[in-house]
Amino acid sequence: MAFVRKTTDSSLPDDPLHLYRVLAVTNRGPAAVWGHQQDVLRAWHQKKLAASDVAIELPTGAGKTLVGGLIAEFRRRTARERVAYLCPTKQLAQQTAAAFDEYGIPNVLLIDRVPTWNPADRARFESADAVAVSVYSHVFNSNPAIKNASLLVLDDAHAAEGYVAKPWRLGISRQDESAYLDVLSALEPALDPLVLPRMKNSDTDKASQSFVYLASPIGVAAHAAQIERAVGAAVEGGKFDGKRADEARHVWKFLQGRLDRCLFYVAYGQIVIRPFIPPTWQHPAFSDPERRIYMSATLGDGGELERTFGRKKIERIPVPEGWENQGTGRRFFIFPELASDLAADRSGLPAFVSSTISEAGRAVVLTPDTRTHDSFIKSMLPSTYSVLKASDVEDDLKTFTARQNAALVLTNRYDGIDLPGDDCRLVVLAGLPARGDLQERFLHESLGAVEVLQERIRARILQGSGRATRNSQDYAAVMILGQSLTSYLSGLDVQAAMHPEVHAELEFGWENSRRHDSANMTDNLRVFLSHDEAWAEVDGDIVRERDNYTRAVAPSSKELQASVRYEVEAWQSIWNNQWDWALTAVRQVLDKLQGQRTPRRYAALWSYLGFSIAHRLAQQTTDPSYLATSADYYRNAQRMSTGTSWLSHLASPSDRASAPSAPPLDELDEAAMRGVILRHKEIGNDLEEHAAAARAGLANTEYQAYEAALVALGQFAGTTESYGNNDDDSPAAPDTVWIFDESRWIIWEAKSEAEAKGMVGPTDVRQAGSHLRTVETERGTSAPSDSFCVLMSPKPGVMASGRALADEHLYMVGPKPVLEIFDRLLRAWRAAHSRSISSLAPSQLAEIFRTEQALPSQWIPLLRTMPVRPQ
């Protein structure tokens, strides 16, 4: 008979492990589930089965796909749930479907344009007869094709930010010039008057072209109707070209009528309009399923996953015991810019990179932006090489792996390309991966809030460097290029926050790169690629170091994880036009961002958002208390953003009309003014005598006189404590330490006797950069946020090998700016002394110091004009 008859399955599996035993009768997959996979599956089934959002962390090569597949199939069989397993790319979806076929998990592949889907396959998913394997874009879309799932399994969740935010992110490119200029003109009341001409002028310098400005939310709200008309006319009036027009129309469906609840990021090449956190809670295709499982090789500790997906809390199943130190395959990191000859003369770098690629054969090159992408192809690749891009390998990697001399050069794509075995033995990471959309660039470059992006950057480096090491037998060299990336990976705190295996590999590669020239680096690379007994002898060194390491939690992670729940609540309230609730949530965000490692600059952004929301409430309610609240938030934003310029670029007409009229007294400035009052009691009428001695010392080169003068300069600056290194037996200790209560530390390493020629070397950089940690140890407490070290030297610059070693908090300064700071302070002291300093309140004294540009907030930028570590 040809009839299909319904049968009752009385042997439903008790748990995912029982399910695999059932599948094992006929599947072609592993003979058994590995012990660590069993641990994860038991943890989910016994402890997290009812949880709506669960994240599972498993390293690459640890069988993540099997774990996710068994959970998906278990729920499909036992609860008859519609299950969709989502991947970032079509290629990964195809690989996943093939793996499910081997495991015996019924599945349908739904990845192409929806009209091309097989209706029978779609019906199998919708009737819960098979797991749908698809891509993120079929859920995160203005018209989702997969919108009725009961369970979503989201693979490679660490790489999902771009896919998740895309439906609410409207990019207006300068290529669509009419649309760009129309929207830019509509934003004029919300932009600093100095910014608008830079954006319109075709001769704008490159530095201004690369800066990302935030348009004033107050100005956007005040002129929302005008801006809405300009954006709507651009989208609906045919001012976008080709594919960009379709994308803009889809996004406009989500943003129309809500532009006053978005942030506007403005750069020379593009305007991006988007909510800070994607409002996924109002997207039924994602929010309606009862459960969401997030699969990732790197989850992180600072709330990145919650911000990405707009969820208040995602419960976590950590890496199983015994796997926290194990990686996949072996990576040999090389840092060409640290090699002795290439550090001294960068002109030889392109030839070295080109010859290394030629020797390795195929290479995958990962770049953060199109400028780096184009520059690499032009200057670093062998002329005989074929250059492939992402679209060339979307359906089949053989386009790349079948060629001997080929480079796959990708932009901002660190996941989704698996090149095991002999497919590829060389990965090139060119540039720090922190140049995603304009929001990411604003956070990193304009705001300087690196801490909130640290998980994202670290995950991209980990995933990018592992493209060619997909199992325990794999091995590949990883070439690190670009001063910013080399410097970033040289940081001890960055290495410590990496997976222990990668930590050991990075340290090994870094040490072996900086101690030799490029010829030796090539010899080492040949030994590694041969992968015989000679390499086995040194591989054990990496393993031993790995076993000694435990991954450290990155600075600020605790505070950022605590705040993320309220960040999501704040943006939910904003999106729903509930401004009073939003202000309450902002206050909770700022409360949670307080701690030993307060992420000050990220807190500055939230303080500014609090200012904008309170100002809007003041207009809506006519309650005068909101104006006082907005002023408090604005002052807090100023205090937290010291050392950056983003807030000054928000001097739009709207902000000028709304910000507090009197300049607020910065916390650091107030501490300094209290210090000046106390110091004046000690100095009394001997001001000129102390000043003469201090200036003579600062004009001197003899180290003892100079260091004594630095101590005196700190006293004039209003420090609570200013002391030097009086122990000649401790040459590694800092020369001078300035303490401003709990507001700031400034630590000095002075090389006053150095000649004004040549370059500062790595030894001096390493010594100066370690001083902050030394003082923390001595004082038994963490340094206040934004504390920094100063390397004073008359030399004109720093060697590349030295820059690569520098910590982010290290700055170099010459003798002249130090004398300028002293002269400012002395003029302020003289003016205040004539009015009897001890009789003045800190705020009154601050007005005198402000006139002479002698407040810390005014002279600190002189010390920070030259960061040793590339930005």
Image (cartoon, rainbow, N blue to C red):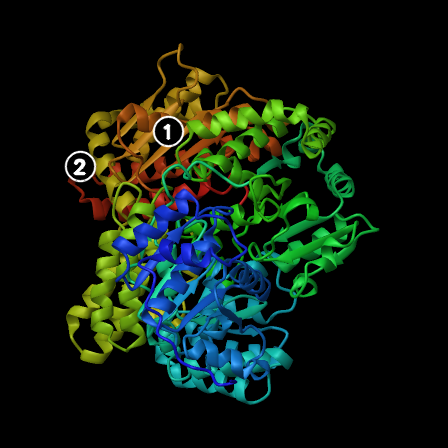
Q: Answer left or right for 747 relative to 250.
A: left
Q: Secondary structure at mark 1?
A: helix
Can residue 238 be seen here? The reply is yes
Q: Amino acid at mark 2?
A: Ser
The disc placed on residue 838 is: 2
Q: Answer left or right for 573 relative to 138.
A: left
Local packing at callout 2 (Cα closer than 10 Å; few below 14, some 14-19, many 20+) is some
Residue at horizontal 58 percent and vertical 29 percent from the top: 795
Give the residue pinned by disc 1.
Answer: 773
- Vertical comparison of 432 with 750: above or below: below
Q: Position of residue 284 (x, y in %)?
A: 36, 77
Q: Secondary structure at mark 2?
A: helix
Which quadrant of the figure has residue 305?
A: bottom left
Q: Answer left or right for 549 relative to 436.
A: left
Can residue 692 be seen here? The reply is no
Q: Position of residue 606 (x, y in %)?
A: 31, 60
> Which residue is most to the top?
729
